[in-house]
Image (spheres, rainbow, N blue to C red):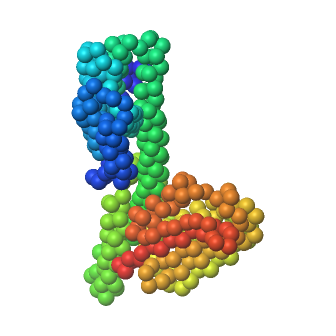
Amino acid sequence: MIQRSLRALWSEPAETLPDNRPWWDWAIATVAVPIAVLEGIYGPELEWPALSVGVGVLCVLVILWRRTHPLAVLVIAFGSQTAIGLLTTAAGFEDQVPYSTSLLLLYPYSLARWARGRDVVIGLVFLMVTHFVREPLLGEDAATIIVGAGFLLLPAALGAAVRFRRTARAREQDEVRMREREQLARELHDTVAHHVSAIVIQAQAGRTIVMDDPQRAAEVFADIEAAAVRSLTEMRTVVSILRDNDGPELAPTPGVSDIARLIDNGTVATPVDLRIGEGLVDLDSATDIAVYRLVQESLTNVQRHANGVTRVDVRISREDDGVQVNVSDDGTNARHPSGSGYGLRGMAERVELLGGTFSAGPRPDGGWTVKACLPQNDSA
């Protein structure tokens, strides 16, 4: 178990970071460098002021690379501080390092937070070696040395905890995304299978009547062409979505026409006012299914999370920019899910896959609103 954990840590990749440095690293360097210089000029008398101030400035400046090169920064900072400490001790002086180098505690954090797993191991080993070599030569007792080691490892532990939390959250989001993509792919596959089955039946009929009734055969072939166009549109969507290798279970897929039955089945205990506009009978299957799922999940959230709901309004309409879906309630917001909820993530992912826009949040006058706009393909 320990060996497997160490192997996993060793192979852990570095965290992906944006190219630009955050402003607060620049701010820390801008403030800390003058402090290190002033400390060397006006602080306690230093035997080697230029060297001490130079080390202090170096330990501060490398903060600009603590995210992109955390191992190198830690080695430079702690290595230079250890070197000057050993030199001054060998010369018979007290350890002379500016207090501004206390920023070095950021570097174990940065190492554990962003570096590759192997760099984390190498950096922590280097950190402990320099600590246990330097401190005894400076005359520190064993208890102080051990406490100091824990003090240095504490920022690394904090960085590892933050990294683990972010990684776990990213994995949860990926799982939600993959589940939603798989479900959408299954539903699209069912629709495509229906179109292809119709094409096969019509082709068989056309082959039978082509000699006896050419006019009727031409109509059949026109229907085949229309079904093929619809199938091609759906298949293009299916190909763009990742899914498992498991075979899908063919089943009727719900759509806008099934929303009324969904509400009548008692999904929400409170009254639901459903209004479906015109022009929603010829939606492409992906949009048709998505509208149903959005309403279904929104009503489920109302049932699970909302307090004091007396009314739920469901509005579905077809506008110039696509199909608009709006589900709102008049309850209190205290128990409604935040933007990190799995249901909201799934809805947002489905809408995003179809090229639409999604938003969810509290209403100014109380209650919760889910809004989505789904593009409508003309070829459908």
Residue plotted at (58% across, 65% down): 361
The answer to whether 365 is drawn above or below residue 305 in the figure is below
Q: Quadrant of the N terminus?
A: top left
Q: Quadrant of the C terminus?
A: bottom left
Up-down: is 375 above or below 12? below
Residue 215 x, y percent position in the rendering: 31, 88
User: Can residue 70 be seen in the rendering of this structure?
Assistant: no
Q: Position of residue 248 (x, y in %)?
A: 44, 53
**Camera-side residue of 206 and 250:** 250
Residue 60 place in picture, x, y as percent:
31, 40
Q: Nearer the viewer, residue 91 or 295?
A: 91
User: In the image, is 94 to the left or to the right of 256?
Assistant: left
Q: From the viewer's perspective, is residue 158 above or below residue 33?
A: above
Answer yes or no: is residue 238 visible.
Answer: yes
Q: Residue at x 61, y 57 (%)?
A: 337
Foreground: 72 or 258? Answer: 72
